Amino acid sequence: MNQHLPTRVTQLPIAETVEDLEVFGLKDDRAHRLRKGGFQAYVNDETARRVEAGVAPFLDLLAQKPNADALADVATSGSYVDLTNRPALGTAASQNVEDFPSHADLGSLAAAVSIGTKNFDTLALANAAIGDIAEGGGVNILADGSNNGFYVKESGALVKKSNASLTGMASDISTHTASIARLDLAVQGAAPNVFANGNLAADGAPPVWFDSLLSTNQTFASTIVTTTNPVLAALGITRALDVPANAETVGLTGNQLCADVRLRGGRIYASVLLESVTGGWDLGSSGEPRVTLRYSDGTFANVVLSAYESLGSNVRRYYGTLALSSGKTAYRVEVGAVFGRPRADAFRATGFWASHFFTTAPTITDTAYPNWSQAAYRYPSALDARVSVLERPTTLARLRYALYDDFRSVNICLFGDSKVWGLGASGLSPSSPRTAHLDDPRNTIDAAVSPTWANLFLRYLALTYCSGAVTAGDPGVGFARKWAIGDVCYDNERFKVRDRRTGSPRPKNVFAFASGPLLLRVLDLPPVSGATDDALYFEFTGDTFKIRLATISTDPAATYTVEIDGTVVGVYNAYSSPSAWGAEQMISTAFGRHRVRVWNNSALQGLRLEAILHHRRIQVRNQGIIGTQSQQWLPTDMTYNLYPGIMDEDEFVFGQIGTNDRATTTSPLRINAGQRTRDSLKTIGAHLAGRGKHLILMTPTRATTDWPDAPNMSFDTQELAMAIRQAAGDLGVSCIDNFAMSTFDPAGGYLSDGLHDNDNGHRGTFRNIVTSLGLVGMPLL
């Protein structure tokens, strides 16, 4: 088959040589016009299906295949067989599609079509009528055994160009579809995962769960947790969906991972890993793993993944295939276990996988499993891993993105020692008595009184991203608020309308007004009917939002429902007489990331939505504890118990610790120098990553009272800064380098006492934070 392949992937000879292919002798004038990868034909109802299913996909595949010479351009070492463990193109093992014409024959076929083609039952009948066949014309032999095929009249004689007639070619091609697709895999590499983050990595794409489609009595109560299972770890998995046991008969506590796709034809190979926490395998009533395909016409198909293999350590991998419905486009794939109820055992679900194939029986070896990246690859190398790291957003970039999203409240925690507390600045609050515990006194949060870098940072965030007013919370905690307006009409990335029962996308009904609504336009969710049950979907991070709507006078019983994370939180009035703009309903919930659905309950009037308003909160928690060392912040430390000061709601964590690590003369620690700080930060950072936190490390400003001149010091702040930078590199997190910022200040103009920053030093650190974040607008101080 090698001689039939183009020499470059970008060439498409078929499109250049075949323009109009007409099957001669059709009695039915209702011809269908097809175009597939440059192949165009007129065929009747009988052959339309065969050509669509056979000829066109084959020509698509044929046009995309590189030959061995083309592979040489990308292969860095070894032969094709070495790279793929499959037979080389052009060998007998690979030449299994012998019935199709070459490119040269396709050229004569096209010419024959333009001249004219005729159908004969036997070759003898065709030769008897040779005088009636134009030179260069084509002939289909349809019922003559081995003589069947397509012929072209050349120099007065019929020359066979294909073992299949044009109408029979589709049937012949279909018998070779599997081998062609297998060859496609050999050339193009293993099939990738459609899930961008199938292993639920903390730094990966946020998972999209099926729970937003659940009905109101099916509460989704599972959370993502860290798993230390050795089998899962060997597969590159450290996180899983935690599904507790459920002895009740109501309340769905499991889910399926979703991926947006656009697929037609072929089949899906799906796989999911289940870890039994309790050791048993009671998945509940109809709770087995499954794969589901949802189609653009509102229908869906699914199949239970009944086959499984035991991997050890109470881990099973369930797998199976599901064929796509003919003639439909699938827009979403869902894989996971339903976890029915009642359910005696607890589980963790992870390792979600789905690959698309045109082969009839794909297996796990045909996929890139367990490469959890969504991107396809052919020849992985060390460069792939490096590119992946470079493309991953830094933790500073993640904070910047969060600040720019006004439907995302942001909680920041600062942990460390006196450099974080604010010692050295003016206007300080009393710092005694102190015991190096979380109940130690905190400094004021008012930047006008005490301009520490932490207070300046809080004030900057309040003025730039909120209303400006700072409210004091617990000691060391300050926050600001702002009502952010969400445009339900035209912000299509954030606000989506879907059918509440199927999850299928629905069009938005938007109406403009010269006056009245907040944004002079509204989104109407139509009256509920047997055919329509639309709902507004959106997500936010925070604790409070308002629904702004117009109340309408049509239906006195009109209401709407609000659901948060699968639980209905209220049913609210949508009626007034007369109709009125600007009605608001405030919804409060626990702080966190939430998925919301709003739907109309009236069959007589629409739900007219003006906007969704989010009461955004930006908060800074200062957990600087004077005199502490990095080891005291370890998650395993029970003496000082400082680590719990980084709260669950704190998404971003700034760490500036280590200056007190220098203060020791113990010989082993002197030998380790900054390595101890690096090790501590790595342990803290890894634990925070497991909790879904984004860590940002900071080096201290340069000290002038330092080793070797200062007593009781084992290393200097330069070595400490290097250890912090290295820990940041180990963890893959950002580092704000205040030491480098203060390098050209050898006289200590930033310092109040040789170590702690004065007001000038605190301003310099604050400005360095804003600059490192890449935020727009540098404040003038």
Image: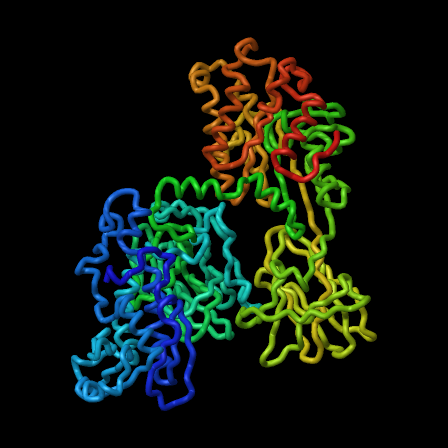
- Indicate the position of residue 698 as horizontal and vertical percent values: 57, 30
Q: Is residue 443 above or below residue 212?
A: above
Q: Is residue 621 above or below residue 592?
A: above
Q: Is residue 122 above or below residue 623?
A: below
Q: Residue furthest bottom?
A: 27
- What residue sits 46% from the left and 56% below the top? 244
Query: Which quadrant holds residue 618?
Result: top right
Query: Which quadrant holds residue 39?
Result: bottom left
- Indicate the position of residue 211 as horizontal and vertical percent values: 52, 62
Image quarter where the C terminus lies is top right
- Indicate the position of residue 353 as horizontal and vertical percent values: 39, 57
| Residue 619 shown left or right of residue 731 in the figure | right
- Numbered marks: total: 0
- What residue sits 50% from the left and 34% below the top? 684
The reply to whether residue 612 is in sight is yes
- What residue sits 50% from the left and 36% below the top? 685
Image quarter where the N terminus lies is bottom left
Q: As rendered, which of 192 and 651 lies closer to the eye?
A: 192
| Residue 6 shown left or right of residue 510 in the figure | left
Q: As rendered, which of 655 and 722 lies closer to the eye?
A: 722
- Indicate the position of residue 755 as horizontal and vertical percent values: 62, 18
Q: Is residue 289 above or below residue 626?
A: below
Q: Residue furthest right?
A: 578
Query: Which quadrant holds residue 753?
Result: top right
